[in-house]
Image (tube, rainbow, N blue to C red):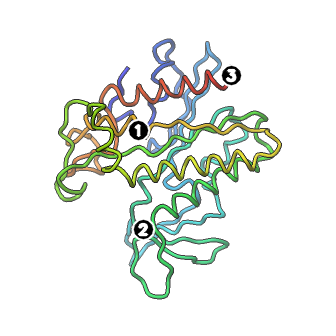
Amino acid sequence: MGCSSKRRDYCNKCRILQVETPVDVYKDLEDRFRTWHFPSSNFTLMVFWSKFLVNSQERIINSSSTGNFNLYFDEIDEKWASELPTLDYVIISDGHWFFRKNHLYEENRLIGCIYCDEPNITKYGLKYALRMSFRATLKHINKCKDCKKGMVTLVRTYSPSHFENGAWNTGAGCNRTSPHAKEKANELEKEFEYELELRNLQIEELERAREEDVGQEKKFMALDVTWPMLMRPDGHPNEFTGNKWMKGYNDCTHWCMPGPIDTWNDILLAVLLEEVA
């Protein structure tokens, strides 16, 4: 079952929708946080939208938004973290919001920044910020005393974009209509080296969380979509995004065509079946 761009953030419910229509329990004003309940299955699905997983505050200059944020690595975004004790399974994904100028904090102390050129501030790369965000998030889950014993956390690895002939804001697009052939795998490995490095650091932080779970009270697993999605340049909405924030630009980051998200669901089902086996 394919999912339209409007619903792409909620596609994990696609499989169960084939069996049962859910009760729409909650939706916030921005359609960022959603809750559905499937009565006959006694199953509740919740979606929480968080830019960086950790606490963040946008920098405001002269009463205007900047699109740049302060990230606090020792403070988790409570909008999602407050619901942890109610959950049996958690799927965490993040990455694309880090591609901007951000200032990094620990214990309310500025430790550095990414994509900045300010004097007397340590310059970090994007990979550092993404790593520290996932480390803080998984550490918080590990230390959650009120969470259910045996709660499963899945890290959905980095999902690559497929802009060609430029960047997202310089006229680039994604006009391909078919997947890459498997024979192109070696070429793609070089082309998407940076994206694969982001995937690898997420897996490394997942392994760290497993090692820190000394009591074996929780489970940490990977929902590894990076390589399959490298092969699907045809799955993006391109100019047909329907996203008011992307108006005037092509969208080669999100997914809406049938296939890619279905693959995520297939991988998720396989991982969960392995977990309960």
Marks 1 and 2 sit apart, C-alpha to C-alpha, by 30 Å
Earlier along the polypeptide chain: callout 1 or callout 2? Answer: 2
Residue shown at 51% from the left, 58% from the top: 130
Q: Nearer the viewer, residue 39 or 221?
A: 221
Residue shown at 43% from the left, 37% from the top: 9
Residue behind mark 3? 276
Pair 3/2: label in front: 3
Q: Residue 265 at what x, y percent from top left? A: 47, 26
Q: Residue 241 at what x, y percent from top left? A: 26, 40
Earlier along the polypeptide chain: callout 3 or callout 2? Answer: 2
Q: Residue 135 at what x, y percent from top left? A: 62, 56
Q: Could you classify mark 2 by the number of other residues whose Cα lies within 10 Å: few (under 14), some (14-19), or many (20 or more)?
A: some
Vertical order, 65 against 169 (above or below): below
Vertical order, 148 against 196 (above or below): above
Quadrant assignment, res 154: top right
Residue behind mark 2? 68
Q: Secondary structure at mark 1?
A: helix
> Which amino acid is tagged 3?
Val
Marks 3 and 2 sit apart, C-alpha to C-alpha, by 42 Å
Marks 3 and 1 sit apart, C-alpha to C-alpha, by 25 Å
Q: Is residue 110 left or right of residue 9?
A: right
Pair 3/1: label in front: 1
Residue behind mark 1? 227
Residue shown at 16% from the left, 54% from the top: 171
Q: Which mark is residue 25?
A: none
> Which amino acid is tagged 1?
Trp
> Which amino acid is tagged 2?
Asn
